[in-house]
Amino acid sequence: MGRGFLYAGAGALLTSLWRVADATAARWMESFYRSLIDGLPKAAAARSAHRALLAEDGATHPAYWGAFQLVGDPRPLSCSRDRTADRSLT
């Protein structure tokens, strides 16, 4: 199914390889999107989200956070926090 989105023009997808508890997925996504907004490349943002969950609880098993995988273009988003701030000044 992911290939269909890529063929339809999506630059990148964040997919889950298995079910993840909603609370854990929400914490991971918050960290991931915060990193993207700060201008990190997508792969680095995913790694940062993994590390954030591990920092919360060093004993967190990868089954809780390892399901997420990035497919497609790993570059940063075209708009970052700096560009958003520039737009608010005009």
Image (cartoon, rainbow, N blue to C red):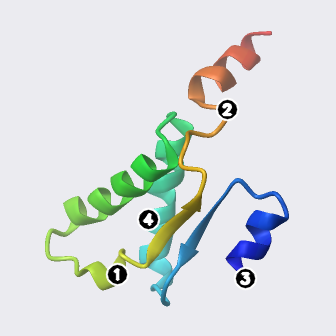
**Residue nearest the viewer, comparing 73 with 51:** 73
The residue pinned by badge 1 equals 64
- Regarding mark 1 in the picture, which secondary structure is present there? helix
Instruction: Kindly identify the amino acid type of the residue bearing the numbered disc 2.
Output: Cys
Cα separation, mark 3 vs mark 1, equals 23 Å
The residue pinned by badge 3 equals 1
Quadrant in which the C terminus is drawn: top right
Q: Nearer the viewer, mark 2 or mark 4?
A: 2
For marks 3 and 1 on the same chain, the one whose residue lies earlier in the sequence: 3
For marks 3 and 2 on the same chain, the one whose residue lies earlier in the sequence: 3
Cα separation, mark 2 vs mark 4, equals 21 Å
For marks 4 and 1 on the same chain, the one whose residue lies earlier in the sequence: 4
Mark 4: give few (<14), some (14-19) or many (20+) Cα within 10 Å.
many
Q: Can you say whether 68 is above or below 20 in the image?
A: above
- Regarding mark 4 in the picture, which secondary structure is present there? helix
When asked about the image quadrant of residue 60, the answer is: bottom left
Q: Nearer the viewer, mark 4 or mark 3?
A: 3
- Regarding mark 3 in the picture, which secondary structure is present there? loop
The residue under the point 78% across, 74% down is 4
Instruction: Kindly identify the amino acid type of the residue bearing the numbered disc 4.
Output: Trp
Cα separation, mark 3 vs mark 2, equals 27 Å
Instruction: Kindly identify the amino acid type of the residue bearing the numbered disc 1.
Output: Tyr
Q: Nearer the viewer, mark 3 or mark 2?
A: 3
The residue under the point 41% across, 75% down is 24
The residue pinned by badge 4 equals 28
* Tag 3 and tag 1, C-beta contact below 8 Å: no
**Residue nearest the viewer, comparing 4 with 90:** 4
Cα separation, mark 4 vs mark 1, equals 10 Å
